[in-house]
Image: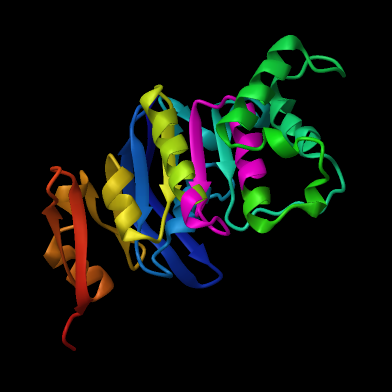
Amino acid sequence: MILQCDNLCFTHDIHPALEDVSARLHPGKFSVILGPNGAGKSTLLNCLAGLLRPRSGSVFLDSDAILALPDGQRAKMLGLLPQGAQTHWAITVRALVALGRYPHRIGLGLSADDQRAIDAAMNATDTTGFADRLVTELSGGERARVLMARVLAGEPQWILADEPLANLDPGHQIDMLHLLRDQAREGKGVVTVLHDLHHAVRFADHVLLLHQGKVFAEGPVADVLTSSNLATVYGIDAKLFSDEEGAIQLLIKGKTAP
């Protein structure tokens, strides 16, 4: 089930945020949206999720226009972790994760399938150990993992995550990236907004590089994150290289000369 946008244009007030953005995103791939601040990364993700209506252009899930889908059907297909997602409800961690099952619920109680999905999501995000704590008592990093567990509990076909590494310590950042990549390996579509280029180089299958609201480059890491592209988009002197184990790494030497 391909997630596709065609000629998207979006304006915040009078300021263009996206201009003629087109992309085809495939299930089974860990796709990463990159670009400097203000490039339109979060706006694009929210358009893909159906949260924002573009000024022109369309988003499709196969042949279905995202904005034409009923809310419940869209929620089953697309799981969104928004940027800076918060919760101020004094409910337990497990109860919050269970909210991710809402699109699948029949009746008032939780079915055996619901319980299984909740358990799997909490195991995957390492949140089982504090299932009975109140969400309001958690650290920022713990809360971020719980909110991702809520997304996974819904068993969506696509996972859209806007800066899911915020508030996570380095170890849990790597865990989260492995989790998202594993979801892609299992056949789901994963689209993530990231800021850290090193993480993108290590984990991404597909990169969409935005610059000033437009698609500057799209494709595999080695094709997109070239020295020339990084200099133009980020103003940095950087290059990809292969380490002793054959893995691609990124060396950032500094800023380019003015």
Q: What is the x, y in percent for residue 70?
A: 64, 28
Residue 124 sits above or below residue 107 on the image: below
Residue at screen point 28% across, 39% down: 205
Question: Of 96 and 228, which appears nearest the observer?
Answer: 96
Position of the N terminus by quadrant: top left
Residue at screen point 32% across, 44% down: 203
Magenta stretch in the rendered image: 145-171
Taking 241 as reference, is 125 left or right?
Answer: right
Query: Residue 150: within the magenta?
Result: yes
Q: Farthest residue to the bottom: give it.
A: 258
Q: Is residue 180 visible?
A: yes
Residue 226 sits above or below residue 242 on the image: below
Taking 193 as reference, is 164 left or right?
Answer: right
Residue 28 sits above or below residue 20 on the image: above
Query: Residue 64: within the magenta?
Result: no
Q: What is the x, y in percent for residue 67?
A: 56, 37
Position of the C terminus by quadrant: bottom left
Q: What is the x, y in percent for residue 14?
A: 51, 73
Question: Of 20 and 86, which appears nearest the observer?
Answer: 86
Taking 83 as reference, is 93 left or right?
Answer: right
Could you say which quadrant of the image residue 133 lies in?
top right
Query: Disc count in the image?
Result: 0
Taking 23 as reference, is 64 left or right?
Answer: right
Residue at screen point 58% across, 24% down: 155
Could you say which quadrant of the image residue 63 lies in?
top left
Q: Farthest residue to the top: give it.
A: 112
